[in-house]
Amino acid sequence: MDARAADSLAGLDLIEEINRLKKERNAVILAHYYQDSAIQDLADFVGDSLDLSRKAAATDADVIAFCGVRFMAETAKILSPDKTVILPDMDAGCSLEDSCPPEQFRRFREEHPDHIALTYINCSAEVKALSDIIVTSSSAEDILSQLPKDQKIIFAPDRHLGGFFNRKTGRDMLLWPGACIVHEAFSEKELIKLKAQHPGAPVAAHPECPAHILDHADHVGSTSSILSWVLAHEAETIIVATEPHIIHQMEKAAPQKTFIGAPGADGNCNCNMCPFMAMNTLEKLYFALRDLEPRIEMSEEVRVKALKPLERMLEMAGSAVGKGDLGDPDQPVAPAAINSVDGDC
Ligand code: 13P
Ligand code: SF4
């Protein structure tokens, strides 16, 4: 933010202003659990990627202010093309998206014509448009169970998430070699030390973590699933191996418990903060609501192609986990366009 923009905020109560603009614009604020706690607290809805997609598809607001990363805001635009979708910082990308350039993905698909592409939602709209079914960490297992056992599948772009589902379901999906820089930064050595310091403390981990971290986990699931699991668990101290901003919701819901972020190689959890999620701030959210910029735009051709695999996900995910802590994700979703997987893209 430049100095002039910063000056224009002097004396403003940002939370009050954001709430005022939200009403004026008929906007809804959707936030991911990895956002700063102040943003989570003023959001209308906080959830995992599946919750947020459902919410974006169902909202009747005119404006969706998406506090998350770009692929999430793009998903909202694909599902709700008539809404204005704003993202506080357009540079809020994702290392998984970066690891899967559309042209390379297109060539990879051409080299494997007998495979369908099951693609993690953490990718660009262009890669979604080249995919058959989109999945999130909370919907992938449910969706995989509906595909024939002998169906050949490319899973992109997260090799750790794909590897986790291969091990869990006995499938042999062909994995794209991408990874999340945040979940790769956990240290097994430091996690073992931490467990020794807190005997009996269970570990909840996100499946974007590498296998050597998941091997120490008592529960592996999406952010929403981790949240419900730690709240239902009787343990007083729980170790959490995902981006540490989710701990805000845990502490709000169970202040009597202790939640410890799993450490990185330096022994603390700061290196596991997502640098992309951190680009969104209250100040930028205020400007985005005031100016309705930066705005998600994409070609109608890409949007329509990307919509099909997203609608497949929403239809096939059924009631898969995904329950945000605020609001009700169980609302009508985008119309189901297909009933079967035909492998085209
Ligand atoms: P979920 O919230 O769907 O578990 O995904 C986490 C994530 O990848 C956000 O970057
Ligand atoms: Fe991408 Fe990882 Fe950040 Fe999620 S935590 S937005 S997967 S870089």
Image (cartoon, rainbow, N blue to C red):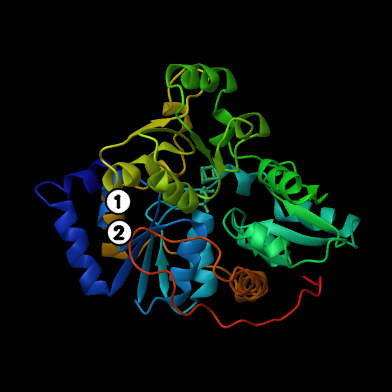
Q: Whole-percent x and y of residue 202? A: 48, 33
Q: Is residue 62 above or below residue 249?
A: below
Q: Residue furthest front?
A: 234
Left or right, 263 with respect to 36, comes to: right
> Is 321 situated above or below 237?
below
What number is the disc on residue 39? Answer: 1
- Residue at disc 1, secondary structure: helix
Between 297 and 324, the one nearer to me in the picture: 324
Nearest the viewer among 271 and 305 is: 271
Q: Residue at x 83, y 55 (%)?
A: 107
- Amino acid of disc 2: Ala
| Marks 1 and 2 in Cβ contact (< 8 Å) | yes
Q: Which mark is on residue 120?
A: none
Q: Which residue is mark 2?
A: 43
In the picture provided, is 282 more to the left or to the right than 341? left
Within 10 angstroms of label 1, few (less than 14), some, or many (20 or more) residues? many
